[in-house]
Image: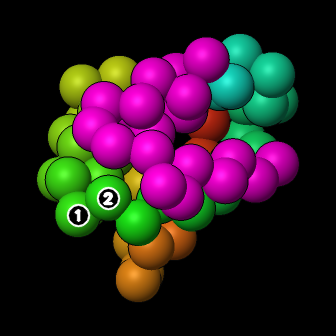
Amino acid sequence: MTLDCRGMLCPLPVIKLAQALPGVEVGDTITVLADDPAAAIDIPAWCRMRSQELVSATDEQYVVRRLS
């Protein structure tokens, strides 16, 4: 699953990620496209707080694996 959150400002990319995660099977990944500079801080922090795995974080693309 891919979420296109480009053009959205903080905290919308994280909110959209949280809303979409229940639709992803445990072990699968969700890719978030976000161009807000705050996403580089917010998405990794959200993963740590929610015990989800940040697989990769590259330029405007964040891959999160659902662990639970």
Task: Kindly identify the residue that appears in the image at 35 percent across and 23 percent down.
Answer: 50
Relative vertical location of residue 58 with respect to residue 50 in this rendering, above or below: below
According to the picture, the residue beneath numbered tag 2 turns out to be 36
Q: Residue furthest front?
A: 7
Residue 21, x across and y down, in percent: 65, 26
- Give the residues in magenta: 1-19
47 in magenta: no
Instruction: Return the residue nearer the eye: 38 or 44.
Output: 38
18 in magenta: yes
SS of the residue under disc 1: loop
Relative vertical location of residue 68 with respect to residue 8 in this rendering, above or below: above
Task: Kindly identify the residue that appears in the image at 56 percent across and 28 percent down.
Answer: 16
According to the picture, the residue beneath numbered tag 1 turns out to be 37
- Amino acid residing under circle 2: Asp
Q: Please say if the residues under marks 2 and 1 sit with CB atoms less than 8 Å apart.
A: yes
Snapshot colouring: rainbow
- Amino acid residing under circle 1: Pro
Relative vertical location of residue 35 with respect to residue 46 in this rendering, above or below: below
